[in-house]
């Protein structure tokens, strides 16, 4: 399966890979593993279509959509580093921080947006381990941040 054909079938467009928001690089490889820095739901124009705490300012459904956009940003970073998403052998793990208040417990439902997108795009290769935790605040008032680890050929 060609990943770019699959993206077209799903009517998904990869945004331009976001630039770092600080003194770091957006990805790092070691051996055949690629680690992304934490990505957010920034749109290609640099704006944030979603901001605030999930469960307060945003619904779980809006958080889910923010997670989908964030996963696409992760894929853009991966494509920039590898040159071709078809080189992805396995999505290994996601680490997800959800900007939410203390008693919010639906982080897994929010992060299913990113997980489902990866499974839709990559099939079984997109199934991954995942950690989803609450964060009391995140930079730029973003609703979530995702780091991704992938194995590549």
Image (tube, grey):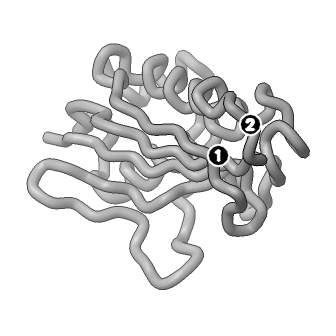
Q: Position of residue 43 (x, y in %)?
A: 71, 53
Q: Nearer the viewer, residue 87 or 59?
A: 59
Name, please, the residue furthest toward the left.
31
Residue at the (15%, 60%) spot, across then down: 30
Q: Nearer the viewer, residue 135 or 19?
A: 135
Q: Where is residue 58 in the image (x, y as percent from the top left)?
A: 86, 39
Name, please, the residue furthest toward the front.
103
Residue at the (37%, 27%) spot, across then down: 3
Q: Around disc 2, counting alpha carbons within 10 Å, would you say few (fewer than 14), some (14 to 19), or many (20 or more)? A: some
Q: Around disc 1, counting alpha carbons within 10 Å, would you say few (fewer than 14), some (14 to 19), or many (20 or more)? A: many
Residue at the (54%, 16%) spot, across then down: 9
Q: Name the residue under label 1.
A: 98
Q: Which of marks 2 and 1 is nearer the N terminus?
A: 1
Q: Position of residue 72 (x, y in %)?
A: 55, 41
Image side of residue 3 versus residue 51, left or right: left
User: Disc 2 vs disc 1: Cβ atoms closer than 8 Å?
Assistant: yes
Image side of residue 13 versus residue 37, left or right: right
Q: Nearer the viewer, residue 143 or 121?
A: 143
Mark 1 secondary-structure assignment = strand
Image side of residue 31 versus residue 135, left or right: left
Mark 2 secondary-structure assignment = loop
Q: Mark 2 points at which residue?
A: 104
User: How many dots with numbers?
Assistant: 2
Q: Which of 146 and 8 is in front in this view?
A: 146
């Amino acid at each position: 399966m060609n990943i770019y054909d699959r993206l077209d079938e799903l009517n998904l467009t990869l945004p331009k890979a976001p630039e770092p928001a600080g003194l770091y690089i957006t990805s790092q490889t070691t051996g055949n593993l690629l680690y992304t820095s934490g990505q957010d739901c920034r749109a290609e124009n640099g704006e944030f279509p979603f901001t605030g705490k999930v469960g307060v300012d945003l619904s779980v459904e809006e958080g889910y959509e923010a997670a989908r956009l964030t996963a696409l940003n992760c894929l853009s970073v991966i494509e920039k580093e590898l040159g071709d998403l078809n080189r992805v052998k396995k999505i290994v793990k996601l680490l997800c921080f959800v900007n939410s208040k203390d008693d919010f417990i639906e982080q897994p439902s929010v992060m299913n947006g990113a997980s489902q997108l990866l499974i839709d795009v990559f099939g079984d290769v997109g199934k991954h381990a995942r950690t989803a935790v609450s964060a009391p605040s995140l930079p730029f008032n973003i609703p979530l941040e995702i780091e991704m680890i992938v194995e590549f050929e």
